[in-house]
Image (spheres, rainbow, N blue to C red):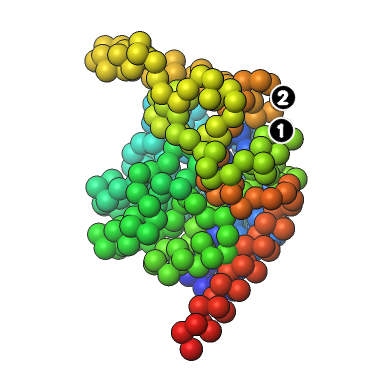
């Protein structure tokens, strides 16, 4: 066991969250995470309706002994938020991760039920705000994250958040090896959130082409595209991404700056981008837009969730032993 605030809070062996990944995460992955000593989290939006979410929560309550998390988009783009919160109120998970908005409503509703509320943050200013609102921990989304990444490296972001906030910090992004896990714990993180390596697992529900891309491409193939959601998002630079480019065209950029039009342009960009990601995730298509982070560098084959966890923990033990040997 590796003992940290995260492991003690949820009674798990290793301080790892299997990160919530849009379209990728599913119940099978969360169940395997729990069986192998870590805790998983899934986006509520991965279920097509609040009714499907409720069915899934009941299954996970039984098969994960209630030890799982749900990721909520807490801004106006999530039209299902109210119903999702009601489902979670009836079927409380162990924790919730809030993203892209204020966690205030979520904290007020779910924290009294014993649900730990974690908040995605990319800087100190927002971290201080959510701490004051009553967040239980910070998910430090760093520059190595997949999807909507931060701008600051974990070696700076984790200590910076610890200096200004009193609640636990969990590092999200760039962890694909046991040595990376060790370095984040050494920085003061109470755990890490790992996503991209788990795309290429047998339990993942995405297409074989998407899984194989995570194996075949590496860190140098990850680019930030503003064409997906209007905000920078890390994707694999496939031939299709190269063709369409990663920056908004002149008209998109111009309209995005217009006070009247920018709200609608962003909504349209987000909708088109999410449909492109969804289409590419589940079927072979030349319009390959695959979201991933640079930690795919350390993925060399499609394997089970269990195998990835075992590899990372064995690497952690080796890295820790080597460190002790060098300083003995």
Give percent across and percent down for residue 136.
Answer: 39, 56
Cβ–Cβ below 8 Å for labels 2 and 1? Answer: yes
Residue 274 shows in this picture: no
* Residue at (55% x, 78% y) in the render: 322
The residue drawn where x is 70% and y is 39% is 212
Q: Residues within 10 Å of mark 1 (few under 14, many from 20)?
A: some
- The image's mark for residue 95 is none
For mark 2, give the secondary structure.
loop
Q: Residues within 10 Å of mark 2 (few under 14, many from 20)?
A: few
Q: Mark 2 points at which residue?
A: 284
Up/down of 284 relative to 18, above or below: above
The residue lying toward the viewer, choosing from 238 and 34, is 238
Vertical order, 273 against 177 (above or below): above
Q: Does 43 sit left or right of 108 as displayed?
A: right
> Where, quadrant-wise, is the N terminus in this rendering?
bottom right
CA separation in Å, label 2 and label 1: 7 Å
Residue 179, by quadrant, is bottom right
- x and y, in percent, of residue 97 in the image: 46, 46
Residue at the spot 56% in from the left edge and 72% down from the top edge: 319
In the image shown, does 134 or 250 lie closer to the viewer?
A: 250
Q: Name the residue under label 1.
A: 209
Going from N to C along the chain, the mark reached first, 2 or 1, is 1
Instruction: Give the x, y percent position of residue 290.
Output: 59, 32
At a point 69% along the width and 28% down the height, the residue shown is: 282
The picture quadrant where one finds residue 312 is: bottom right
Q: Can residue 37 be seen in this view?
A: yes
Q: Position of residue 300 (x, y in %)?
A: 69, 50
């Amino acid at each position: 066991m590796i003992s940290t605030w995260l492991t003690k809070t949820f009674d798990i062996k290793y301080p790892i969250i299997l990160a919530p990944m849009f379209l990728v995460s599913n119940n099978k992955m969360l169940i395997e995470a729990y069986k192998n000593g870590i805790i998983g989290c899934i986006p509520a939006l991965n279920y097509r309706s609040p009714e499907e979410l409720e069915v899934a929560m009941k299954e996970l309550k039984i098969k994960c002994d209630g030890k799982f998390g749900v990721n909520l988009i807490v801004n106006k783009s999530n039209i299902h938020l109210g119903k999702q919160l009601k489902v979670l109120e009836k079927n409380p998970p162990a924790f919730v991760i809030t993203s892209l908005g204020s966690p205030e409503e979520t904290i007020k509703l779910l924290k009294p039920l014993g649900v730990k509320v974690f908040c995605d943050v990319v800087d100190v200013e927002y971290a201080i705000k959510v701490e004051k609102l009553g967040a239980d921990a910070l998910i430090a989304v760093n520059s190595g994250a997949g999807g909507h990444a931060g701008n600051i490296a974990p070696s700076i972001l984790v200590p910076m958040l610890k200096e200004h906030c009193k609640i636990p910090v969990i590092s999200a992004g760039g962890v694909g090896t046991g040595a990376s896990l060790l370095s984040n714990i050494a920085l003061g993180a109470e755990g890490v959130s790992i996503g991209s390596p788990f795309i290429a697992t047998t339990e993942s529900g995405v297409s074989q082409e998407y899984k194989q891309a995570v194996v075949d491409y590496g860190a140098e193939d990850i680019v930030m595209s503003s064409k997906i959601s209007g905000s920078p998002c890390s994707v694999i630079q496939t031939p299709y991404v190269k063709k369409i480019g990663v920056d908004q065209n002149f008209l998109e950029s111009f309209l995005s700056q217009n006070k009247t039009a920018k709200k609608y342009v962003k909504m349209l960009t987000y909708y088109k981008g999410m449909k492109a990601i969804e289409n590419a995730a589940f079927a072979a298509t030349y319009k390959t837009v695959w979201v991933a982070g640079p930690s795919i560098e350390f993925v060399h084959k499609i394997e089970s969730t269990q195998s990835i966890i075992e590899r990372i923990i064995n690497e952690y033990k080796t890295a820790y032993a080597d460190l002790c040997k060098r300083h003995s």
